[in-house]
């Protein structure tokens, strides 16, 4: 029997990058998977379209996913957007937008999913956080604040929901080779030099791969992680473990 046989997972941001790799891996390991995204996904998943900033749409999409899968056991809160700059550089509109997607987006999807997760015998939430939550990255004030909130929320939710049998953990990726990062490199002045700089700040000397992050998410979502809750698992090429500070 496969590890996720009989389990039903909802992955937000499942249309691309880490979310797509996670949805694919969970499905390969036996889960039934729904993807919630503003864009289409290429994978063989139940697709529910919603913008995580739209509470009505999120509620409808989560309930459609639960209906089509026959319930929900796993929620992967992964949809997110980036922002560059110091605390002065981003406009208040940008602050509101990024916090709305990255923080309130997680709140909206979680609130819609909790009633379904409470009925599961193996309920787990995994949030895609970031090394930015704790690394003190330069030029990432807004993004870091949004992911710091997610790491704190993960811990608080783990405490609130453990008595209901719901585990809550997060993964903290370093720079991962996804369409998001490739888009950023495409517009860099010298894409090759920028990629080399990103690679060299991770002790492994390369970017993290999306399947590596997906494997960490799958572990935390698995019934085999049944004794793990309130944790942040770094998938960052050794940055946190080796206490290295980024440039
Ligand atoms: P990506 O851009 O490749 O994929 C993100 C997906 O989220 C897309 O399919 C997009 O359509 C969806 N999405 C964006 N805004 C949405 C919204 N408002 N409503 C619904 N869906 C929305 O990005 P990725 O690199 O795979 O990033 C996924 C997650 O991983 C994000 O939360 C990001 O902060 C986090 N992360 C990424 C990296 C990295 O280096 N790539 C590092 C650390 C953390």
Image (cartoon, helix red, strand yellow):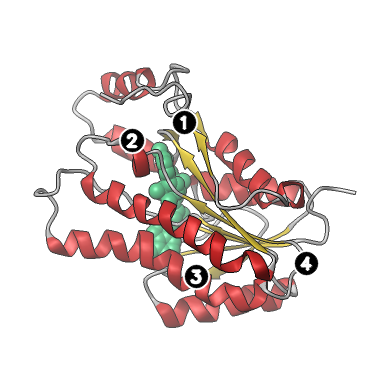
* Element assignment for label 1: loop
Q: Residues within 10 Å of mark 3 (few under 14, many from 20)?
A: many
Q: Nearer the viewer, mark 1 or mark 2?
A: 2
Q: Is residue 126 left or right of residue 225?
A: left
Quadrant in the picture for residue 247? top left
Q: Is residue 98 left or right of residue 161?
A: left
Q: Are marks 1 and 2 in contact (CB under 8 Å)?
A: no
Q: Are marks 2 and 3 in contact (CB under 8 Å)?
A: no
Q: Residues within 10 Å of mark 2 (few under 14, many from 20)?
A: some
The earlier-in-sequence mark between 4 and 3 is 3
According to the picture, the residue beneath numbered tag 4 turns out to be: 121
- Separation of marks 4 and 3 at Cα, in angstroms: 20 Å
Q: Nearer the viewer, mark 4 or mark 1?
A: 4
* Element assignment for label 2: helix
Q: Position of residue 210 (x, y in %)?
A: 53, 37
Q: Which mark is residue 109?
A: 3
Front position in the image: 38 or 144: 144
Q: Position of residue 243 (x, y in %)?
A: 39, 24
According to the picture, the residue beneath numbered tag 1 turns out to be: 236
- Separation of marks 1 and 2 at Cα, in angstroms: 11 Å
Residue at position x 71%, y 47% in the image: 225
Residue at position x 24%, y 36% in the image: 187
Quadrant in the picture for residue 202? top left
The earlier-in-sequence mark between 2 and 3 is 3
**Can the viewer see residue 5?**
yes
- Separation of marks 4 and 2 at Cα, in angstroms: 35 Å
**Can the viewer see residue 36?**
no
The earlier-in-sequence mark between 1 and 2 is 2
Residue 223, placed above or below residue 206: below
């Amino acid at each position: 029997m496969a590890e996720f046989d009989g389990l039903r997972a909802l992955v937000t941001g499942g249309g691309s990058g880490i979310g797509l790799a996670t949805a694919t891996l969970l499905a390969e390991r036996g889960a039934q998977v729904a993807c919630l995204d503003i864009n289409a996904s290429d994978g063989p998943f139940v697709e529910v379209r919603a913008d995580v900033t739209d509470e009505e749409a999120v509620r409808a999409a989560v309930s459609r996913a639960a209906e089509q899968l026959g319930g929900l056991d796993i929620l992967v809160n992964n949809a997110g957007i980036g922002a560059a700059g110091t605390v002065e550089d981003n406009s208040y509109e940008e602050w509101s937008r990024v916090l709305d997607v990255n923080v309130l987006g997680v709140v909206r999807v979680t609130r819609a999913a909790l009633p379904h997760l409470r009925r599961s015998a193996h309920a787990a939430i995994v949030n895609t956080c970031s090394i930015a939550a704790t690394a003190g990255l330069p030029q990432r004030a807004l993004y870091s604040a949004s992911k710091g909130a997610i790491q704190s929320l993960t811990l608080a939710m783990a405490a609130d929901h453990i008595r209901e049998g719901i585990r809550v953990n997060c993964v903290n990726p370093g720079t991962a080779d996804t369409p998001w990062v490739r888009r950023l490199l495409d517009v860099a002045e010298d894409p090759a030099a920028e990629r080399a700089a990103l690679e060299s700040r991770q002790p492994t000397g390369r970017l993290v791969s999306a399947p590596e992050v997906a494997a960490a998410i799958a572990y935390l979502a698995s019934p085999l992680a049944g004794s793990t809750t309130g944790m942040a698992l770094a998938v960052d090429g050794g940055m946190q473990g080796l206490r290295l500070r980024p440039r």
